[in-house]
Amino acid sequence: MKTDEVVSIIDKHQGQGDGLISVLEEIQSKYSYLPTDALKLVAERTGRSPVDVYGVATFYKSFSLKPRGKHLCSVCLGTACHVRSGQIIAQEFERQLEVKAGETTPDHEFTLETVACLGACALGPIVVVDGHYFSKVNTAKVRSILKRARRGLDKVEIKTDRRIFPVAVSCPRCNHSLMDPAHPLDDAPSVRVTATFDGQHGWLRLSSLYGSPTLESKHDIPVDTVVDFFCPHCHAELRGASSCPECGAPMVAMIVRAGGIVQICARRGCKGHMLDLNGGGF
Amino acid sequence: MITLAINRLPVAVEEGETLLEAARFLGFPIPTLCHMDGLSPYGACRLCVVEIGEGPKARLVSSCTYPAQEGLKVRTASARVLRARKMILELLLASCPQSKIIQDLASAHRVSQQRFRQEHEDCILCGLCVRMCEQQMMAKAIGFRGRGETRSIGTPFDMKSEQCRLCGGCIYVCPACQLRCTYTEPDKAICGGCANLSPPCVEKEQFDDMMCYMNPCVACEIEKD
Ligand code: SF4
Ligand code: SF4
Ligand code: SF4
Ligand code: FES
């Protein structure tokens, strides 16, 4: 841990009037865990007592006080995944990695954790590795998931990705289609969601051409605003499990009809996105 | 002023006063465990339940945290309240049977059986020590950690706290165990012989899970580590 790095994270968030959790989140994403000295520094610089900082850091399951592995493997045990034998999949991961859930392998390659609902119930059982969704997982797929993670799950980025093709998407929670054929964008049915930012709320249409930045919305969204996306049918937030590889904002997750999950960056103007298609063995 | 009726007796109290304070003003006894004058209400033990409202809308609330409301009808000893209170005591007794305070409360409320497995917890998470430390000792040396099953009390990182002023306030208020700090003067212990023949800290291998956060301990002078 470098003191000046942590200090600059703290100062940045303090300047923005952010709370403790945002500070801890950024420290964690930088070091993969919350080092003791960093927590002490946070308490010191924000004028909070160490008890409060420690209390918050130990309260939330997403914070870890122990170093985590290179790859984070989250097995969903929410109700929908549980009834589709998520527990057995978690056990299979435990068996193959030879660690219990919540632990890190001795070689610091993998951290295994179980989570309660990743918001993609329709595709359960879900496993998320390094921000990539694996849907309808069964025990036979566990080995190849781990193998792919070891090789590195490549991130598809717009800079290198010139593929333009239409995708049909639906809500990961209720599985309703988000396609709106009545309002085409880029000559293809648009993707309709509800968007909220700065207290404004209204419809938003995205191009269904993968990689195309075309979009229309009820309110003008200034560039760089981080928007919350919701399903217009079940009103669940379309929040992905990872943050944008480009800018760090939260990702918006949607199910691809053909199988798999697409994630796009919630920041207006940012082109970060990831695609996990259920082809090639998945 | 707010007027409400407690056990059909009208009483007027200042705005912001709790049902517990109003009931005590009238002299109705309500047992409490996690409440202490001078500390903020916390509502952890639920022992102070009372019944408010009427008919199908009647419900149980913790009187130490519920603010008095105009026209509210409160019953402090209805059959439903007594039943709930007995159950809470039985559960408390199961989790911490060695506590003299809980034993006394249980016997005062005629809880004579105990159907649950005894856990011998050394903390019932009443939060008295945390509030004592923060609100009266102005130290904030200890606090809650974790949540759910793994919730516990202690210093950050389980390390010696720089904020702790070794006042012993935390041990003094702890209802889970009162014997431990009579160690240098064992005869001062009034009771508790049923469960604790010697201070728990000398019998236990580790101090960590004793509810004594002082380091070094100035109450008994037993070396830690
Ligand atoms: S002894 Fe230390 S931890 Fe206990 S109340 Fe006093 S200051 Fe707080
Ligand atoms: S240590 Fe004692 S006073 Fe503190 S929360 Fe636990 S039971 Fe209550
Ligand atoms: S070490 Fe702590 S618990 Fe033990 S007798 Fe001393 S003050 Fe009490
Ligand atoms: S005294 Fe009211 S909940 Fe404990």
Image (tube, rainbow, N blue to C red):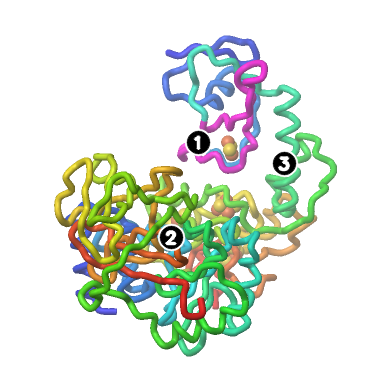
Q: Which amino acid does label 1 sit on?
A: Asp
Which residue shows up at 27% across the image and 73% down it?
A163
Label 2 secondary element? strand
Label 3 secondary element? helix
Position of B48 relative to A47 (above/below): above
Q: What residue type is labelled 3?
A: Leu
> Which residue does the numbered mark 2 point to in the structure image?
A255
> Which residue does the numbered mark 1 point to in the structure image?
B37
Q: Is residue B123 left or right of residue A180?
A: right
Asked whether residue A41 is in view, the answer is: no
Q: In which quarter of the image is residue A31?
A: bottom left
Q: Residue A232 appears at what percent x and percent y? A: 39, 43
Position of A11 relative to B72 (above/below): below
Q: What residue type is labelled 2?
A: Ile
Q: Residue B62 appears at what percent x and percent y? A: 58, 32
* Quadrant of the snapshot with the C terminus of chain B: bottom right
